[in-house]
Structure formats: structure tokens, C-alpha cells
Image (tube, rainbow, N blue to C red):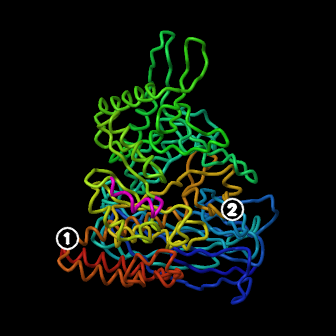
Amino acid sequence: MNLHYSLAHENYKQAHGIFSKTFAMDQLEINQQTIALISARRDWAALQLLLKADEDMTLTVKNRPSFTPHGPLVNVRIEVDLDGFPDSDLSVMPVGYVEDDDRQYRPDVLLEDDTVFVERLKVQPVWIEAAVSADRSPGIYQGTIRIYTHKMFEDEILARTMTFTLRVYDVALDDPGDNRFYLNLWLHMSNIARKHEVPLWSDRHFEILEHYVRSLAQLGQKSVMLFVSEIPWSGQNCFKIVNNLSDLFEYSMVRISRSAAGEFRYDFSVLEKYIDLCSRYGISREIEVHGLLNIWTCPAEGYAGPAADYPDAIRLRYLDEADGCGKYMKLGAEIRQYMQALEQFFVRKGIVDIVRITADEPGDILAYQLRVQALKEIVPRMKIKTIVGHPEFLSRLDCFAGEEMDLIVHLEAACDDWAAWQKCQNRISGLKGYYVCCGPQRPNTFISSPLLECRLIGLVAAFMGFDGFLRWNYTVWPDKPRERISYKYPVWQAGDTNFVYPANNGRPLLSLRYKNLKRGIEDYALIRRLQDLHPDSARIIAQIRDRVFKIQDIALLSAKSRKKPDELFSMNGEDYAEMKRTVLEALESLSN
């Protein structure tokens, strides 16, 4: 068997399915035998090992025997050492491929399997990561990768040794929960219950949710997402997609009943349990409430609002104990009473000041004003967050001038009318973030997106003056996402619905996109610290900005500029590594 090896940076991605004409099919397109990594303390460093053979094989990342139903194949075993680092600080994981919309396969899933089957001529990436603790001594550490091969009952042979270095700077990153980056990735909890086949809001569901909450906390999630009415997005119109039928409905965390005497009772115990779970992992800066404002409707298919005398399509189901029937509130007075009870729950919990009733992409400004005004009268202590997806809506937000309202703007909407966005920033107080979803095409976090675009998420926020980033897609998987993640193409591109994948053990499998997003969030935090502490920060930041971005006016990220990605920002991972090195050296110099 001819086996080819190379090292690659953490942002490397290569499609499988159509072979390039620029290199032989049985060879790798890169040939890097050593690599230099950098990190701060309380940080992490990563690289990829690439393997490619002219025969089928198995890959093992643990010291264990390996046999396969594919027959007597060569087994390749990987062993990694890093001087001074215990094995518990090192992760070695095969990277799994997913099928993209174009039917090519691209690496994304960080697998927890000890052994995987690798077909001939397929590049098999291996993710190698070192956790750098807060008390790790600064210095340069030597790493070794050993590649062993054998077949069946033969003795292993050491086929190749590769090396890498890790330089640790005398700078400690903040804990993810303490950094200043506002991160809000939406966790669709009903979908998690469906994919793991457990009862909604059961103890087992919460056990599984804890693993997902932990993974969000490790990214630096700041917001707790709550659902307080039924199907606020009407299932993302999933009932219209017939070629990959998938259930995307999200259900309320509040259980409502009405006594035989006609008195409503509200059970907020699931809400409280989830809020407390997130708080244990440091996610407690914001409570984001969905289901009270700008409910998505599809009246032609029956997805309208049950209460004709309320200006929004809020769907509140209750059990009527008089006859045992489930019913929906059909009177505005009932909905108002529920909202007031919900506000009092947040008051008793001591968190009402951080609650944000959230509207996702309102389109009719007059209807939106009416709905916001109704909420202010019903629940005056709960503030509003508006997710702005349309440039024309952005230009009409002047009606809220002088008020406090968090605004999260679609990146393309902000770039298309930068003057209107700046006016909103100046006239409406509150947090200001941005988001991407099914657009723009770049930068984005699709399976097809270069991994550096995931890292750019934090840098766009840093250089455009945003407080942070929101994305709707942490766990909005279609049915059987490990088999087919492509869904609703071309409106949604593969990867638009997720950053993680559901594992069979009730945990999330992370992805290359997750890791590169995390890196970009840390870039943001380091740049903000540099601005706060370094006397020459303006010059240094201009230097690193020019290294990463190829445009002076970042509003040119708009699709209207018709610029290609490599005309807008660097596609060279070395530029991003050098950017981090520059910032760490500048911060380290402050303590010398």
C-alpha cells in the first residue's frame, strides 16, 4: 500500500468526489511534514494530519486492536505526544465527511470513534488538539506524531514520524463565559428530543440537553433561549418540503391548564429548570424569549393565530380540566393574563432585567409597532430584541428612536444600507449584533464555506463595531442529519441548520466549523483586550486588519459589490496565524 502523509492547519478543508487535475489521484495536494503552532494560556492549539492511500484501510486513534467487516485491511494507527502535556490534554479524532448540496463530500464532523474505515484515494483528516491550561508555563513545546501500520496479526511497524512545535505565550485568555463577545446560537430543544428519541422535557431530555449546553458554554454562549408558546416559526414551513420530510416544530416549555372553575394555572417548572441548567454553565447574561412577538404564520395551510382579537398569532395550548380536552387560547384577554404571569415569574426569579422578548425578522413595520406597543402595555418590565433581516425595515426603525431595544442585523442588510444601520446605532440604545443565515453567500458557515469564513465571524464583529453574533442554526437538523444534512436547497445550503451533530450516545458531535468559529470568537476577545490595554493598539489593529481584509470599506462585504471572497479577505491561514501572533506578542510585551 502506498500511503501519503501531510500536516495541515486547523482551517484546511478538501472536497472528495471530483479529483483535481493538478495532482495525481493517489497523492495529497499538499506536502507539509512539520508545522509550528501558537497559543495563549487557557487556550488550545490544533492541526490536522492528512492520510491518503491507494488501497482501502482502517484508521485507529487509540492503542487498541482493530478489525473490520471489510476484510483483512492494513490498519494505520496514530499516536501523538507533546512534551510536558498529559494524554488527557490531547485529543486525536478522525474527521467525518458529509454530503454537500453539490453531492461532493466535505470534512466536518469530529468523530469520537476509535477506528474508522477509509476508502482508497480518499483524504482522511485527523484532528489533533492540545488543551493549554491557564497555568501552563510559557515556552516552546515539541510534539511528535507517530504513524504505525500493520495488517491482521502482523507486528506493527513505525511507518513515519512527523513533528510539530507549540509556542505558548505568557498571555491568558479569558474564560469563554467572561469574554466580551455576545454569542447567541439558537438551541432547538424539541429537535434535540426528536433526534435522540426521548420524551420532550423529560429527565432524560434534560440529561441530553446538558451536554449541548456545555458545548455552547465552551464557545462562550451568553444567551438562554426559551420557548413560551407553540411553534413560533410554524416549523420553518417544513410541511412544504416533500423531498426530505423533516419535523422542525418547536414547542412551548410552559404547561398551562384551566380548572373546572375556569381559572388558568401556569407551570413554569421546565423554564426554571432550563434557566438553572444554563446558569450552572455560566450562561446567564441574557434570557431570550421566543413566542410572544412576530409569530411566523402561513394562513393558507392553517398556521394562523387562534385569537382574533390579539395583534399577533400567539398559540397557547392548555388542558381544560372541565372536559379533559386540549384547547388553544382564543381570547386576547387570556393571552395578556398569561404574559403577565410570565413576567411575574421572571420578577420572582430576579432576572426580569435581562429578559428580551425576541422578534425574528419582522417585515411589516406598522404591524410591528402595534405588537411592540401592546407588549409594552402588558409586560412593561420586559425589553424587546429585534432581529432585522430586511434593509427596507432597517431604514424605518426611526419610529423607535430614543428607546431601548437590542438590535441584531443581518450582515447583508447592514452592508446594503450602512448609513441606516449607523443611524440605528446612534438613536436606539441597547446591544448591537449581527447575524448570517441562508445568506450572504460569504462570509458564512455552510459546509461549502472555507473554514476561514467561520473564523471571520469574530473578526467582522471586531472591525465593524458589533457587540457579537447570532445564528439560528445550532441544532435545526433535518431528519437523519448524519446521513443527509442537505435540506431545502438552494434556499438553505448544507450546514445552514447546524454547528454540531447528534451522536448515538446522547451527546453532540462537534465540527470543524464549530472549532473555527470558536477561534474567531477568541480573536475578537484578544483584539478588544489589545484596544483596552495597549498604548499603540490603533496601529497594531490597523496592521492586522489590513492583513486579513483586502478592502478598506467593510460595507463592501455586501453582495452588491460583486467581489469574490479572495478579493474581500485573506484565504491564507498563515495570515490569521500571524495576526494572532502579533496580538499575543503585543499583549505579552505589556508584562515585560
In space, the residues marked 1 and 2 are separated at their CA atoms by 47 Å
Task: Characterize the local packing of mark 2: few (<14), some (14-19) or many (20 or more) Cα atoms within 10 angstroms.
Answer: many
Give left or right: position of 438 versus 581: right
What amino acid type should be assigned to the residue bearing mark 1? Leu
What amino acid type should be assigned to the residue bearing mark 2? Val
Disc assigned to residue 90: none
From the image, which quarter does the C terminus lie in? bottom left
Q: Quadrant of residue 554?
A: bottom left
Disc assigned to residue 533: 1
In the displayed structure, would residue 462 be above or below residue 472? below
Task: Give x and y (percent) for residue 391.
Answer: 45, 64
Q: Main secondary structure of the magenta part?
A: helix
Residue segment shown in magenta: 389-399
Say what secondary structure mark 2 lies in: strand
Residue 40 vs residue 85, the one in the foreground: 40
Disc assigned to residue 116: 2
Magenta stretch encompasses residue 397: yes
In the displayed structure, would residue 341 be above or below residue 216? above
Residue sitting at 57 percent across and 56 percent down?
A: 498
Residue 279 vs residue 181, the one in the foreground: 181
Say what secondary structure mark 1 lies in: helix
Residue sitting at 44 percent across and 80 percent down?
A: 36
Q: Residue furthest top?
A: 261
